[in-house]
Amino acid sequence: MNRLCTHLLAALLIGMPFIGAKAQDLMSDTWVGTDALGRHMPTSKEVGSLKKDKARTVGIFYVTWHTQDLHNRSGIADVSKVLQADPEARINGNSPAWPGGMGSWHWGEPEYGYFLSRDKYVIRHDMSMLTDAGVDVLIFDVTNAVCYYDEWDTILETMEQMKKEGNTVPKICFWAYNGPVITTIQNVYEKYYKKEKYRDLWFYWGGKPLLLCNMRPDLDANGGGVTNPNPNFDADAVTNTANPHYGNTDYTEKNYKFYTREVTDFFTMRNMWWGYYEWGGKRYVGTEDNWTFGLQMNDKSVADLSPKQLASTHQGRLEECSVTPAQHPISITGKSWRRQTSEPKLNQYDEPDSAFVPWLGKTVKNPSGYGIYFQDRWDEAIQADPDFLYLNDWNEWTAGKYPIGKAPGSDADGPQEFLGRKNNTFFFVDQYNAEFNRTIEPARGQYTDNYYMQMAENIRRYKGARPIPVNHGFTPIRFDGNLNDWQNVTTKYLDTRFDTFHRDHDGYSGLHFVNNSGRNDIVESKVAFNAANVFFYVQTSAALSPCTDHNWMLLLIDADCNSKTGWYGYDFIVNYNVKNSSQTTLMRYSAKEKQWKAVAVISYRMKGNEMEIAVPRKLLGLLGNKATFDFKWADNPQNLKDPISLCTDGDTAPNRRFNYRCIWTR
């Protein structure tokens, strides 16, 4: 066998053990981090240990309507860009700034661009982000009786592949409500559940798969009167006593009146709709088995309810609460709305100029990114402490633009004004701009990943968190390149496997996205101390690439655990200037010069998919019998502009803004 084949076989054998591996617990609830607003990710010291008195579940609305055919649409429809180009367009729907022929509009640009729902690169990042944050279940959208089978299959197949690779992913369930909801649910049941497809991804509640639906199918948001055709209607079963389905209304009625017996027997079913005080002539929010996906907080009857009164109940338990970043533009309840102040005055871009931020204790300009409404809802939900927290939403992004006075998609009467303006010629319902949307997925520009980090922070407050592992004593590391002695170090810092997946997929309106920056897939790290050095170990899923590569295997160190010092908290960096195959550079960030400055040449060793680095403790200021610092590995970020640079290219361990915290005691 020639040398090239030997190297290729070695690389394949290194990666093979991870395929089909048991899912590892990344212990992401022990990761630390700071968002763009300076909010710190709480640890178990702040939120308490993982709560074990009952199960606490977090679900999130996951939208799949960014279908492949939208690639063929001409022009990008982004409300934020329209209003920046022509502020008067917020009133005049006929402004040239509004491109014609658009069925839906983005409120802003997603971090990964105007993606489509079958983009596996985006799916993988979504699953990783949501799992890291502590989300347990995705709620797939069937609320308008549209089944996105192609999108669902791609997502579910990708999730199963990630599980085979040793990753943890959320479970899934479906939520249907409007239109022929009985027929829609029957079709979903027969396609997936009856055939036991993707069974290992089903989410169970009360011992059965959970189904969120309309338990009054004669009444929906469009007023009711919907016909539910029976796809299994058997005319022979109506009269033929020998027919096995004779007398079974699941087969003998042309149109369903209610859900079939096999559906009602199979699922745990919960009604779910918006948190109105009354719906369909009956009390709704806070009542038995009536879940909500948001709260009508601009209604005083709802706003006056206590946190526990806002929770849905089931047999005396507080079962479900909903948490959303905002409400609707129609109700003028955006991301900066509060009970005490309502919606702040809007500027020429239909965004508030300023608002008071309670957690900051002061008034800020451009408050939409501060999560004011979001935090109020979190505080209420955590105080109520239900069994299930429903978040709305992750990735809806788009909404329709409708003529004023007409209900969406019909000739029925609709809103007569928009954002309090009676001279508007149009209105939006669910999403509109940076202030009026419910999206948690990171946005490009705007407020980046503030809402994602805020979600992760509050999930920890709801569930608790495990203590950060502690390293004890000196460890004899020979530093000879064999790396076998690292087996004696038991504290591991783990990362998502195979998150270096390359991107090559269509986007909205003729866009095509390519990202081949994934290179070294970082899966495991360790740290060890002796009297003179702190040693770092890293392992990748396949053989490491050459050390001459761009931004190769960077090690970022926050030596003082202070996000306000250094480069966004990182005081030191290793491998930003690699000397050769055994020597690299330790550099320190100079705030005065705004650049990395060399401190010393240090040694490293690598073999196959492993590497170790020795850094003198005195250079990091980590002397004495105790040390605490944060660190992160990053491979192939295209630049080091800001922390988001570490989120969109290559691989980082841990993911995104998070850091590992090393606590060591002699």
Image (tube, grey):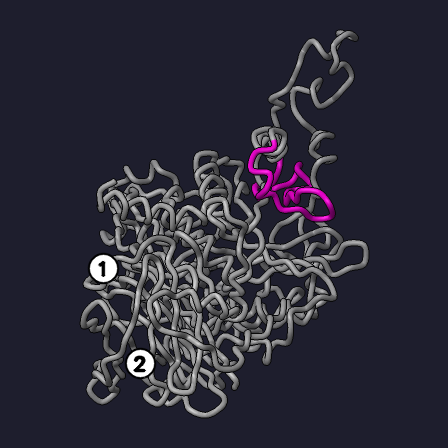
Residue 134 x %, y % = 55, 61
Region rendered in magenta: 196-225
Numbered circle sitting on residue 572 = 2
Q: Nearer the viewer, residue 629 or 220?
A: 629
Q: Nearer the viewer, residue 65 or 633?
A: 633
For label 1, count other residues whose C-alpha is less than 10 Å away and answer few (under 14), some (14-19) or many (20+): few
Residue type at numbered disc 1: Pro
Q: Which residue is mark 1?
A: 546
The residue under the point 55% across, 74% down is 469
Numbered circle sitting on residue 586 = none
Locate residue 305 relative to residue 572 in the image: left or right.
Answer: right
Q: Does the magenta portion include 294?
A: no
In this view, 605 is above or below 283: below
SS state under label 2: strand
Magenta stretch: helix, strand or loop mostly: loop
In this view, 26 is above or below 416: below
SS state under label 1: loop
The residue under the point 61% across, 34% down is 193
**Mark 2 or mark 1, earlier in chain:** 1
> Which residue sits furthest right?
316
Residue 567: quarter of image: bottom left
Residue type at numbered disc 2: Phe
